[in-house]
Image (tube, rainbow, N blue to C red):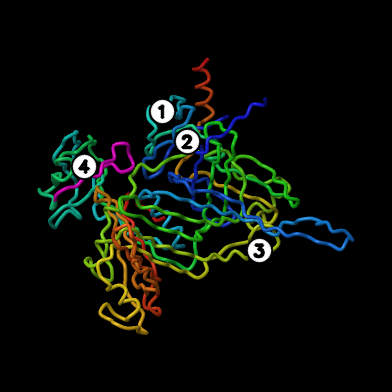
Amino acid sequence: MQKIPARYIGEHSVLLHDAIEPYLDAQGKILPTRTLCSGDTLMMRPEELLGQTFLHGTSGDVEYLGVGRIVKPEHAHLKDDPNALLNVGYEFHEGRSDFAEIKVSPAATIKSKAKDA
Amino acid sequence: MPLIIPLRANNAYIGLGKQSVSGTAVAPTLFPRWLDGTMLQIEMKAEDIWEGDTTRHLSQVIKNQQSVSVKLTCYPRPVEMGFLETAALGVGGDSVTPATVNTTLSASTSIGATAITVASNTGLSGSGTISLVIQPGLGTEEVALFNIPATGVGPYTLTVNSGYNSGALKTAHTNSSVVQSATTHTITDQYDGNYYTLEVGLGSLNGGAGTSFRVRDCKVETIKRSSKAGMLLQYEVDFIGIASTTVSPATVTLENHQPFYFVTGTWTLDGSTSGDAPNVETFDITQKNALDTTIQTEQLNLAATIFGQLTCEVQYEVVFQNANRIFQTYYGSTSGTADAQAIGTGALSLIFAQVDGFHTVTYVVPTIHYTKIGFPAPKADGKHFKLAVTGSSVSNQGANTFVVESIVQNTQTAAY
């Protein structure tokens, strides 16, 4: 599953639960400890970091629209009206407030790929 | 024979996050270590539809309503405790008093250091001791006890109290590291509660085939704070949520602090630290918010929930030594001798302070009307008599602005 780099910005150090898969930092290196302190980086699922959007249909069906806050083109005229979107069936989930996305510039990505090659 | 892959029942987590608005879920940020009794249940109200179609057969069943119940049982850590207290007590209930000491190290320290130097002496006058955290939130966080006043003209010197690790720091700290006293969160009951998102993973961690349920728009229905001799301070919190969905399992992060021990409690009962106060064996403070779960409009799920009438009941059991509490409750005063109209009135202040002296929680119930005394029951086993006390917290006819207050001191500087 694809993960993206995040920085822990919480006020308190935390202990990552004992997982089977190793935890990786933003550089892809295995974390040396399960203790995460403010400023440390971690690869995380995008939806946990950036939130996600669901759309509930009138017949009880639920459509997963993807990571982040997404509004379908047919509802674009409602995008600034949260109540209207709620009435249409949108359910927005915000990402974790104790982590921040580390934005990787395209140039850095290209450079990184070149280095890997 | 088909292969079955059972899911271990401890492959589970519960996470909590505070929503900024109703209807928008959040990814949880706090993951208390759960205890048995923690559970999630989607509550469905259904109705049998019997129609006159000439048969004896049930025609169909329809859903009337769906909501979600989540129960969390845990030994809360200091940061979690403030979160749960604010969730239980309501919107804007957390009044923050910033740390009185907020300075930095003026020089690095090594393991075994017997003193530190700090840039400011604000909050470090007077005499006695003070508990301070160095490098809060970092892997090198250390809570230590120091002697005050700080000496010198700046930078100021603080010696480590001999009661802490024989007067020596356990960890090295870099120059300019933050040094703080505790932040105080004074949390009182409010008109209504915030909405929270709860997430419960059932067999979904470590690639398990289970599911993580995310429940939005949860409020606290009841909270029970309890403990007993020799044990830890335990919370049982019942939430009611409006709607749920399934999500990918969370990155579970656990708070790096200790729970509270019953033995660290200091009791003040009816204004006194003597009498029954030092002889409590068990206690609980149970608060019910009586959520209105009838607000349903044009959807299967509730449209909202609101706090209803607040009740707070205090119960404790003491080693029976005299009948004063019985007289107080039924005979009008501790020296009463016959039935009396007057209700027995008291109060509770209960402080649990961790060994570090930094993290504390205080419960204040300003006016208790005693409603029942469980009489000591004769038993042939020859063991000691116990006396069970039950009382309701009241506003004292409006004189009190709250019926329950929790004061949490920890390293969280922001309001919950």
Mark 1 belongs to which amino acid?
Answer: Leu
Q: Residue furthest toward the front?
A: B380
Residue B370: percent from left, percent from top: 37, 73
Percent of width and height locating residue B13: 49, 42
Q: Which residue position is annotated with label 1?
A: A31
Number of residues whose C-alpha sits closer than 10 Å to that of mark 1, classed few (under 14), some (14–19) or many (20 or more): some
Which dot, 4 or 3, sits closer to the camera?
Answer: 3
Q: Residue at x 64, y 44 (%)?
A: A70
Mark 4 and mark 2: Cα distance apart in space: 29 Å
Q: Is residue A104 above or below residue A115?
A: below
What's the residue type where badge 3 is placed? Answer: Gln
Residue assigned mark 3: B296
Three-letter amino acid code of the residue under disc 2: Ala
Q: Position of residue B176 (x, y in %)?
A: 24, 40
Q: Contact (CB < 8 A) between labels 4 and 3?
A: no
CA–CA distance between discs 2 and 3?
39 Å
Residue B332: quadrant of the picture:
bottom left
In the rendered image, residues at marks 2 and 3 fall on the same chain: no
Q: Kindly identify which chain the residue marked by label 2 belongs to.
A: A
Give the letter of the chain under mark 1: A
**With B128 as the anchor, is B37 left or right in this view?**
right
Instruction: State which chain disc 4 sits on.
Output: B
Which type of secondary structure does the marked residue at label 4 adopt?
loop
Q: Which residues are magenta?
A: B134-147
Residue A6: assigned label: 2
Mark 2 residue element: strand
Q: Badge 2: how crowded within 10 Å, few (<14), some, or many (20+)?
A: many
Determine which residue is flagged by label 4.
B105
* Residue A99 vertical placement versus B361 (above, below): above
